[in-house]
Image: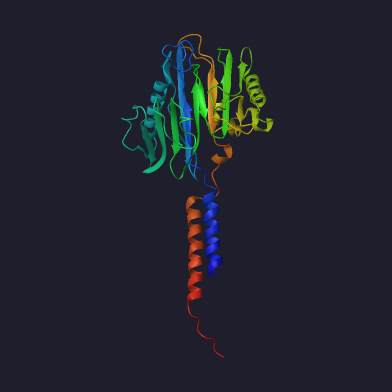
Amino acid sequence: MRRPALLLATIVTIALFSTMPLLAAHSAEYPNTAAGCAPAGNVPAPGGKTGMTLYYRKLIGPQEKITTGDKNFGACTPGGAVVTDLSNELCKACTKLPGGNVIGGCAGIPADGASFTCQVNVVDRFTVWNSATIPVPFPADTCSAASPCPVPAVVAKAAAGNILLGMNRTTDAGNELRVDLLPDLHVQITPRGTDGNVVFHAELGPSPGLGPSFTVNTTSKKQSQIAQEVANGFIAMGYSASQVSNGDISGKSQDPQLFNGSSTRVSNIGTLNGTPVKFVSVQGVPPSVPGQPGMLVEVENSEPPSTTFVPAVSEWTIALFIGLVLLMGTWLLRRRLTPQAPQAV
């Protein structure tokens, strides 16, 4: 009986741990591509608001999040300054969580290349790097001399036992947002009186700028029409129609309230016609009047919506089950090794 019991324990353990997702890193990039800025900047004139929200959870548990809120950036603010500010705001947001704490505090986060680890009830949840100009050498499989880590970027990685569910960026400043890359991309464009061309690009490499692009002009179009044209553009890029959905699909987002109305979602966006996608960029239109709300661009890169569901059993139930299996195996082994009294004739 010893071998069946040990085999059963091994199968259960492998089944549980093989379903745990890889602890991948994710970056939100703010490149210095704003037109008319000298020196180069990420935020075009006349400036506007940019914000970020990070979503995470334990392997088994409900979704949690931290957010920077909307931050005002002036014309031609460089990407490094945007990244530094957002990283610092995420750090402060961690300290406001119930039971939240930052190892070493947030004072050092404005330093280029600095990082912080957010804890909740003394348990590490995730780490964020301020990669303003210093590349983060992580993950090793996407960072090399031929393909360096992106800068300027906010880089996030889930701690062991956690999942990074996604990152959402919002902007009405018209600055380029680069997404690098969790499986799904969710986009919503709301002109708010500022119309023009929204540019989408999938970077394939190896040289910069290689990959398909498309443009959606929002002039005199409803949000639903814009979402449909964005969907058509991704299909024209080469993504299959089954990967692309649009309309009132806010329920597929990690944060449905941010995507009320019509939006577009592309699943498994990391591969296009068999070629790995390095990043996807979205760039809207800056406001025409300083201080006035411009075109709102919301971009979420996240795990598929199914990963946000809470399993029917808790982690304690799973631990108890494993313990019972191991106990049963020990009992069977001892029973086998214990001499049996001879039967009376």
Residue placed most toward the observer, 287 or 43: 43
**Residue 192 picture location, percent across and down:** 55, 15
Residue placed most toward the observer, 93 or 341: 341
**Residue 150 picture location, percent across and down:** 46, 28
Q: Can residue 121 be seen in this view?
A: no
Q: Can residue 15 be seen in this view?
A: yes
Q: Which residue is drawn at 44% across and 31% down?
A: 155
Q: Quadrant of the C terminus?
A: bottom right
Total labels drawn: 0
**Residue 73 picture location, percent across and down:** 42, 17
Residue placed most toward the observer, 178 or 327: 178
20 on left or right of 132: right
Q: Please, which residue is most extreme toward the front here? A: 146
Q: Which residue is drawn at 36% across and 27% down?
A: 112
**Residue 133 picture location, percent across and down:** 39, 25
Image quadrant assignment for residue 49: top left
